Amino acid sequence: MKTKAFCVAVIALFLSLNVNAQLFWKVSGNGLSKPSYLFGTHHLIEKEQIAGFDKVLAVIPQTDVVVGEMDMSNMLSMQLKMLKVCMMKDSTMHDLLNAEDYSLVDAQMKEVVGTGLDKLGKMKPAMLSALYEIKLYMKQNNTKKEPEAVDIVFQKAGKKAKKKIIGLETIDQQLDILFNSMSLKSQAESLVRAVKDKDKSLDVLKQLNEAYLSGDLKRMSDLSNGEEQMTPEEKKTFIVNRNNNWIAQLKTLMPKQSCFVAVGCLHLVDEVGLIQQLRSAGYTVEAVQNL
């Protein structure tokens, strides 16, 4: 996977009125007795940066269930499973990198993350790439703490309002997609490129954040589909297959109850995105103009 593609894919798995108009959508018609809602999230954006976020949050009590990529109620269990999946059994980074690349990655991990490969070398390279990209972004923006994902904020609000929380994937499914869909060698190559092209990675994140906060879905689509982005096979694994699976579930869930659906913003865009797929299925999907 290309460096930019990995940055977009992973970070996208763990993201004014104009913002709401582009990221917050109402789903109606096609026999629905009550509307459902769709919100595109971005994990590196503070909820305070999203104008009108409290008004979006206030819609949750009006719905019946909160739907996310995963049920994030038990974070400790999720973290333990992630730690287990992200560890290599029979390899180390010494086995996957030549001496020059090992030295380069080790130095950058020490500088950016604060810990070198002597401690992190049993982690799968995909996890190291995700950790490196996030810490690099935080350091560049002088952020001391990673923002609380708005996905979690929505689910907490749902639990407070006594709403059922539904995950479109299990943690095991998502971890398998993120950390087992590429060979360890390919992951290692992507990690080396991420380190060597860190300025490009930061630029991709900056552009994605700007597009998100301006509600520019076309720009988001361009970022994920442009030059040096995902190959067709990678897009099928990270985006298309998952979107198709989610749409099948939503078409079963929405006729039964009003759903507040919050998933990564890159899953909304493009012809394979949730917005277009819902429209193609006969639903009316329109931007929420007035909250």
Image (cartoon, rainbow, N blue to C red):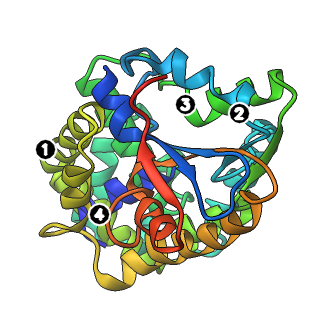
Please tell me the numbered disc located at residue 107.
none
Return the residue nearer the eye: 289 or 68: 289
**Amino acid type, label 1:** Asp
Q: Residue at x 60, y 23 (%)?
A: 57
| Nearer-the-camera pick, 19 or 226 | 19
How many neighbours does mark 4 have within 10 angstroms: few (below 14), some (14-19), or many (20 or more)?
Answer: many
Residue 148: x %, y % from top left:
55, 25
Amino acid found under the numbered disc labelled 4: Ala
Q: Which mark is residue 150?
A: 3
Quote the CA–CA distance across marks 1 and 4: 14 Å
> Which residue is at a point 63% across and 46% down the rendered structure image?
36
Residue 112 makes an appearance in the image: no
Query: SS of the residue at dot 1?
Result: helix
Amino acid type at mark 3:
Val
For marks 4 and 2, give the one nearer the viewer. Answer: 2
Rendered location of residue 161, percent (x, y) = 81, 23
Q: What residue is pinned by disc 4?
A: 5
Describe residue 288's horizontal placement relative to residue 88 as left or right. Answer: left
